[in-house]
Image (cartoon, rainbow, N blue to C red):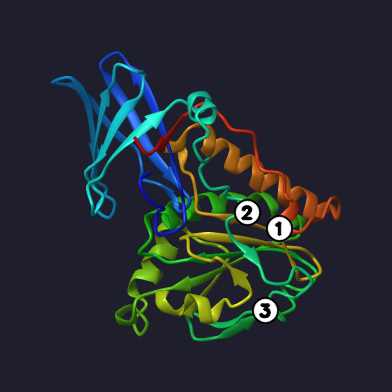
Amino acid sequence: MPHDSPKGEKSWRLIVQQKGADIETTVLRVDGDTGGLTGSWQDGKFVASHFDGSRPGLIELTPQQDGTLSVNLRAEPRNEVLTAYRPEVARAKGLPEPANYLTHTTVRNPNEIFAYSFRDVDGKVESNEDPKFKGKVVLAIVTGTWCPNCHDEAKYLVQLYNQYHAKGLEIVALDFEEADQQESLIRVKAFIKQYQVPYTYLIAGTPDEMWDKVPQAVNLNTWPATLFIGRDGKVKATYSGFASAASGVYGKELKDDFTSIIDRLLAGDGVQSTASITPPSAAPASNVAAR
């Protein structure tokens, strides 16, 4: 890219699946993907779009003679034209890799207990000191119902909770909503009902209060962000953003990463700091970088 993204990214991933004249595509950033866009070949380029109420998007992909793709992300504020290279070509050129979702966000002190204390939707204050969290493996999710990728993650978290809760897993959402949502919590309650959220949902504040309310996290700037907490109450790993099914192999890798970390923490084996988690190997897709 001609300049770093607001999250400090130097490149993104472009995932494209072509079937004849039709394509399915998405751009995967450290926050998560843009959702699945579908389209077809039109006037010398692929044009794909989608509208899901909160994440409209339009992308134009024009093949170039050198084998790259010219990428016009029309949903972007600056409407920039980028260039996509196949991973092996991008690496041969020395272009920067996309952000590592396992190391983008860290914690200031891995030996520090991860502390939180916020009210739930009924006004009851719950904290990391509550008996239901003590001695458990806990996923703490920095989230907001206004965030499309947080909706994608919530569906998966419900599956994880149902799979692992009886084995000792708890999930706690640290939810950040706009000021006009804080009193009624209408949207939060609708969100919980829509996805039948069985895990703890705490109202932590407004989005601009995130850094004050979660001060132990470093470079916390994605929605969502997931912190994996061991039975000792300390953060063992982090994961930035959420890759949905639209991200293809990267969505599968995310699920593999989540379950691998949870399994290790529940077993009490292989507990590592956030700095020593080994990232997954790169999978076939295109890196979006500067022309």
- Quadrant for the C terminus in the image: top left
Cβ atoms at labels 1 and 3 below 8 Å apart: no
- Where in the figure is residue 129, as x and y percent of width and height? 72, 81
Residue linked to disc 3: 115
Dot 1 falls on a residue whose secondary structure is helix
Residue flagged by tag 2: what amino acid is it? Thr
Q: CA distance from mark 3 to mark 2?
A: 21 Å
Residue linked to disc 2: 103
Q: Report the side of 198 relative to 281 (left or right).
A: left
Q: Nearer the viewer, residue 202 or 90?
A: 90
Dot 3 falls on a residue whose secondary structure is loop
Q: CA distance from mark 1 to mark 3?
A: 17 Å
Residue flagged by tag 3: what amino acid is it? Ala
Please give the name of the residue rendered at 37% of the width and 77% of the height, measured from the top-left corner: 185
Residue furthest to the right in view is 269
Residue flagged by tag 1: what amino acid is it? Thr
Residue 260 sits in quarter: top right
Q: CA distance from mark 2 to mark 1?
A: 7 Å
Dot 2 falls on a residue whose secondary structure is loop
